[in-house]
Image: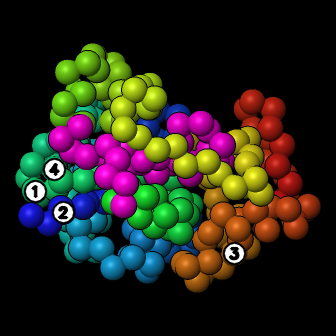
């Protein structure tokens, strides 16, 4: 029987550090989550793109966006991300999940394609580029079997179930997994390509203004080119990191 792969984008509006961050505009007309969705659709012919969110009233805004863009969605547990993923997989009969998060708008689609190929060719349980932390923060792509997520879920307790891949990441050497390391030119774990703070949002907006409207241009190669080239824009991060762009 043919395996059914789904891209699950985990999304909610209840962030404490930057409330409603995924619905904030990354340019004049597009929100962060829309930007990610549009980039995926521009580069991948993928039918099973599913937004998985919560049942909370505040996340009705995410559902309205999904309906507007004709995107599949699922509403499940607020804090138990493992259960939310498993319940969504059951509803849509998904065998394998490509897990993304909605506050990482700059994931490299080329890396996603490479990971998917490795995952399918070698029949791994779990493939990721985030075990060793060699990629910039916010580049995380994780692919895993639903059956393995279910099997190992009994070992993940309480607050740790807020992290879908907690068991995979903590036990990657014990299971049939592959850790994809960043090419040397992309190894900068201090660069933040996620949106978690207001400073991240400013940085994301600036990147978009410099790279432009072609959604296929948002590769790590181009992002690093822009960062290395530009010297007239500075962000002071909470942890002391300074980036000129």
The image quadrant of residue 40 is: bottom left
Mark 1 crowd level (few <14, some 14–19, many ≥20, 10 Å Cα): some
From the image, tell me which residue sits under label 1: 93
Mark 4 crowd level (few <14, some 14–19, many ≥20, 10 Å Cα): many
Q: Residue at x 70, y 68 (%)?
A: 221
From the image, tell me which residue sits under label 4: 89
Image side of residue 164 versus residue 197, left or right = left
Magenta span contains residue 57? no
Q: Residue at x 80, y 61 (%)?
A: 227
Which stretch is magenta? Answer: 121-148
Nearer to me, 67 or 179: 179
Instruction: Kindly tell me whether residue 62 is visible in this rendering.
Output: no
Q: Is residue 182 above or below residue 41?
A: above
Tell me the SS state at disc 2.
loop
Label 4 vs 3, first from the N-terminus: 4
Callouts 1 and 4 close, C-beta under 8 Å = yes
Q: Is residue 56 above or below residue 151?
A: below
From the image, tell me which residue sits under label 3: 211
Callouts 2 and 1 close, C-beta under 8 Å = yes
Image side of residue 41 versus residue 77, left or right = right
Image side of residue 65 versus residue 117, left or right = left
Q: Is residue 89 above or below residue 232?
A: above
Tell me the SS state at disc 4.
helix
Q: Nearer the viewer, mark 1 or mark 3?
A: 1
């Amino acid at each position: 029987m043919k395996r059914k792969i789904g891209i699950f984008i985990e999304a909610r509006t209840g962030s404490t550090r930057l409330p409603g961050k995924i619905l904030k505009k990354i340019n004049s007309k597009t929100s962060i989550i829309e930007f990610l969705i549009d980039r995926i659709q521009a580069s991948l012919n993928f039918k099973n793109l599913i937004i998985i969110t919560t049942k909370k009233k505040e996340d009705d805004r995410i559902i309205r966006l999904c309906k507007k863009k004709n995107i599949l969605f699922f509403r499940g547990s607020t804090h138990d991300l493992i259960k939310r993923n498993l319940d969504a997989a059951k509803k849509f009969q998904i065998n394998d999940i490509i897990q993304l998060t909605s506050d990482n708008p700059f994931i490299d689609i080329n890396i996603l394609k490479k990971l998917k190929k490795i995952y399918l060719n070698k029949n791994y349980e779990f493939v990721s580029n985030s075990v060793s932390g060699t990629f910039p923060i916010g580049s995380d792509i994780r692919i895993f079997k639903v059956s393995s997520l279910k099997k190992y879920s009994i070992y993940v307790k309480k607050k740790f179930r807020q992290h879908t891949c907690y068991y995979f990441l903590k036990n990657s050497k014990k299971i049939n997994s592959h850790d994809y390391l960043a090419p040397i030119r992309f190894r900068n774990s201090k660069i933040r390509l996620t949106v978690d703070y207001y400073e991240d949002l400013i940085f994301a907006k600036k990147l978009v203004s410099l790279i432009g409207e072609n959604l296929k241009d948002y590769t790590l190669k181009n992002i690093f080119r822009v960062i290395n080239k530009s010297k007239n824009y500075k962000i002071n991060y909470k942890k002391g990191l300074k980036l000129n762009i």
